[in-house]
Image (tube, helix red, strand yellow):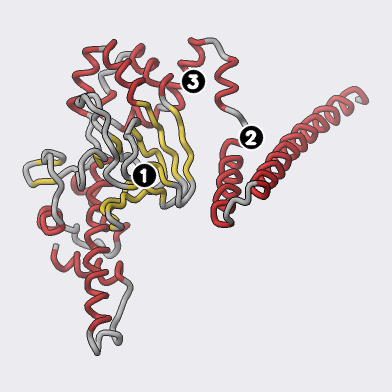
Amino acid sequence: MALLYATIFGNVTTIFQQMYANTNRYHEMLNSVRDFLKLYQVPKGLSERVMDYIASTWSMSRGIDTEKVLQICPKDMRADICVHLNRKVFKEHPAFRLASDGCLRALAMEFQTIHCAPGDLIYHAGESVDSLCFVVSGSLEVIQDDEVVAILGKGDVFGDVFWKEVTLAQACANVRALTYCDLHVIKRDALQKVLEFYTAFSNHFSRNLLLTYNLRKRGCIVGVLKTGLFRSKRALTDQEALAHWKVPEGAASPVDAKQALYQSAKLKPQQGNMLFYLWLLVAWREGRARTRRAQSSDDGFDNMHTPLETGLSAASAVM
């Protein structure tokens, strides 16, 4: 019995020691970052973003260095782990459905996972678009000329169709995180290397991968027409978007509308997301315009609502 108690207490002691060790490592890292920010007089706003990012990243990873763990594993095992880590991307997007096991393993080894905090800029206007980004969680906004032109969410893809282009593109807009986001990213050179080797997959991939937002071209949100989803190669105007998508009956809120859209149209996640966010963006624009008109009139302040509230009712009425 004494031996049993000794074993139990010994294991408990080991667990607590590991917990304290991880906590100590976390606080040591925070202190080092604080000293760095203070030494180089980093502005307060940026310092707060850095500290917030470190805290959120640590809470998600629990202090585990994924790259370090993968380096310990042999190549075959590392490839299997990478396929598992990127399984959401491979399952959600039709472009990967015909990929062989070898092709998926090669792709998975090239993917990187990026965690973004609210306010982080993934792309700045004018910089080179050298990556293809798959949104696994969170929301982002695309900004052109200080105007929000698109909102991206889970299942969306942005970047450039560089497998069809010769030159490297310059980003036409800023892409900024609205919430905490997880992006699975593959570099241009790495993707092209895999596509050149797996030629059969390359043809299927180039035909079936649909970018929600192409950063090479201004305003290039994939079009939605009555003849089918994602058929148009040009961006839709607000009026076209309102004309071609009707809010389902009984949808009292944007969330209800999105859910009803999924059920009634049997859309894939990325298609439903794009339609919903496009409708929400149109509603916000319309609401902001009406709010401005109300502010400019003498009697407009009595019945004023927020731009989104005003726009949702306006968009629903038009649709």
Residue located 31% across and 76% down the image: 305
Q: Whole-percent x and y of residue 296?
A: 24, 82
Q: Is residue 229 above or below residue 240?
A: above
- Which of marks 3 and 1 precedes in the sequence? 3
Which of the 4 quarters of the picture holds residue 185? top left
Badge nearest the viewer, 2 or 3: 2
**Residue 259 seen by the camera:** no
Outermost residue to the right: 2
Depth check, mark 1 against mark 3: the one in front is 1
- The quarter in which the N terminus is drawn is top right
- Residue 195: horizontal and vertical position, in percent? 27, 17
52 in relation to 155, above or below: below
15 on left or right of 286: right
Q: Does dot 2 land on a helix, a strand or a loop?
A: loop
What residue is pinned by disc 3? 81
Q: Which mark is residue 175?
A: none
For the view shown, which residue lies furthest in the front direction? Answer: 40
**Mark nearer the N terminus (2 vs 3):** 2
Badge 3 marks a residue whose secondary structure is helix
Mark identifier at residue 63: 2
Q: Quadrant of residue 240?
A: bottom left
Q: Circle 3: is it few (<14), some (14-19), or many (20+) Cα within 10 Å?
A: some
Residues 3 and 233: in front is 233
First of labels 1, 2 by sequence position: 2
Tell me the amino acid under the disc marked 1.
Answer: His
The residue pinned by badge 1 equals 124
Cα–Cα span, label 1 and label 3: 32 Å
Q: Marks 2 and 3, how far apart in space?
A: 18 Å
Residue 181 percent across, percent down from the top left: 44, 44
The residue at the point 43 percent across, 19 percent down is 109
